[in-house]
Image (cartoon, rainbow, N blue to C red):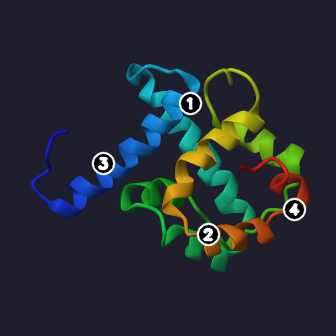
Amino acid sequence: MSSTGYATFDTTLAKTNGVLKQIEESYGWPKERRNRSYAALRAVLHALRDRLTVEEAAQLSAQLPMLIRGIYFEGWDPTKVPVKMHLDDFLARIHDEFPFEIPDSPERLLGITVQALRRHITEGEWKDIRASLPEDVVAVLP
């Protein structure tokens, strides 16, 4: 890993690369497909962010590595959330934002991506997020 010369940046870069690598390994994508793992992360983060209340979205963001937090907030308009989405709408949102063919299903893309993020989210916060989502969405989360 290249060093930025600033420990905080090096740490967030390493954590972000770890999440992307976990997504790639789960799908069997080579590192050369990093753009796919990034797109999966971005699509899932944005769907979650827009389904949560402003308060819950902010609480989740506080636990994300700094670089992932930037991806999470990219393009966010807190005056337009929460967007009421049940499972079909939630998965369609992920599918629409993922610019590649999904290898199997949006449910699996969601599950793999959330699983890669889980090591950065406390159990208490994860319970709060799950409590904020519709039951049909929670049913497909890891």
Residue depth check, mark 3 versus mark 1: number of the one nearer the observer: 1
Amino acid type for the residue under numbered disc 3: Ala
Q: What label sits on residue 26 in the rendered view?
A: 1
Disc 4 designates what residue?
134
Proximity of marks 4 and 2: CB atoms separated by less than 8 Å? no
Nearest to N terminus: mark 2 or mark 1: 1
Amino acid type, label 4: Pro
C-alpha distance separating marks 3 and 1: 18 Å
**Marks 2 and 3, the one that precedes in the sequence:** 3
Residue corresponding to mark 3 = 14
Left or right of 92, for residue 13: left
> How many residues crowd around disc 2 within 10 Å: few (fewer than 14), some, or many (20 or more)?
few
Alpha-carbon distance for marks 4 and 2? 19 Å
In the image, what residue type sits under mark 1? Answer: Ser
Marks 3 and 4: in contact by CB < 8 Å? Answer: no
Q: Would you place residue 65 above or below residue 1 in this image? A: below
